[in-house]
Image: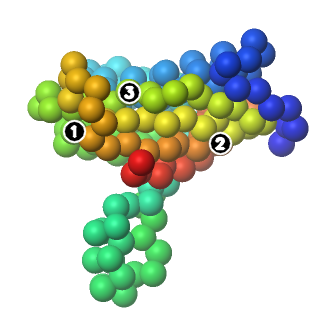
Amino acid sequence: MSTSTSTSTSNGTDAGAAQRIADRYVALWNEPDPQRRRRAVEELWAADGVHLLQPPEDMRERAAELGFADTVLEARGHDALERRVARAHEEFVAGGDYVFREQGEAIRVGDAVKLTWVMVRPGEDEVLGGGVELLVLDKDDRIATDYQFPGL
């Protein structure tokens, strides 16, 4: 792992790259066209890339009641990632109720990019949900591991 640090507020090339990745990442979740979403998944994630999600508290509690100690949800590979993004789009964006957008600026440290996203109603600023992503990149700056932490 590189020891250099840069943020999107600096003039370094890593800062611009971090923000471009964040911009593309958030735009993907709002993309209505399935073919464009698939293409974006393939461009953003490595072929064996993984998205790991710590589910909401109610889901974790229910899983614990059923005897599941580990409730982290996982989507691995382009097909599973595409299904994950499509499902989120269907649930939150397709009906016109919500959109996702970045909050603040992306930060890159070595091979990791941290970004914060929020969910709002179109044309409004009131934050209704959100979270933090930690994207670990491979040598080609594609997402190898995407850790999603919903809840702000």
Inspect the image, locate mark 3, and give the three-letter code of the amino acid beneath it: Arg
**Depth check, front residue: 50 or 70:** 70
Is 57 placed above or below 5 here? below
Verify CB contact (< 8 Å) between mark 3 and mark 2.
Answer: no
Percent x, y of residue 74 = 45, 57
Of the image marks 3 and 1, the number of the one nearer the N terminus: 1
Residue 45 position (above or below residue 145): above
* The furthest residue to the front: 126
CA neighbours of label 3 inside 10 A, class few (<14), some (14 to 19), many (20+): some
Report which quarter residue 33 is drawn in.
top left
- Left or right of 23 on screen, residue 128: left
x, y percent for residue 64: 36, 82
Q: Callout 2: 10 Å neighbours few (<14), some, many (20+)?
A: many
Residue that badge 3 annotates: 101
**Residue lying farthest to the top in this orientation:** 11
Out of 8 and 14, give the one closest to the viewer. Answer: 8
Residue at mark 1 to residue at mark 2: CA–CA distance: 25 Å
Q: Which of marks 3 and 1 is in front?
A: 3
What mark, if any, has residue 136 been given in the picture?
A: 2
Q: Residue at x 35, y 20 (%)?
A: 36
Q: Residue at x 75, y 12 (%)?
A: 11
- Badge 2 marks a residue whose secondary structure is strand
* Element at label 3: strand
Q: Can residue 86 be seen in this view?
A: no
Please tell me the numbered disc located at residue 92: 1
What is the three-letter code of the residue carrying label 2?
A: Val
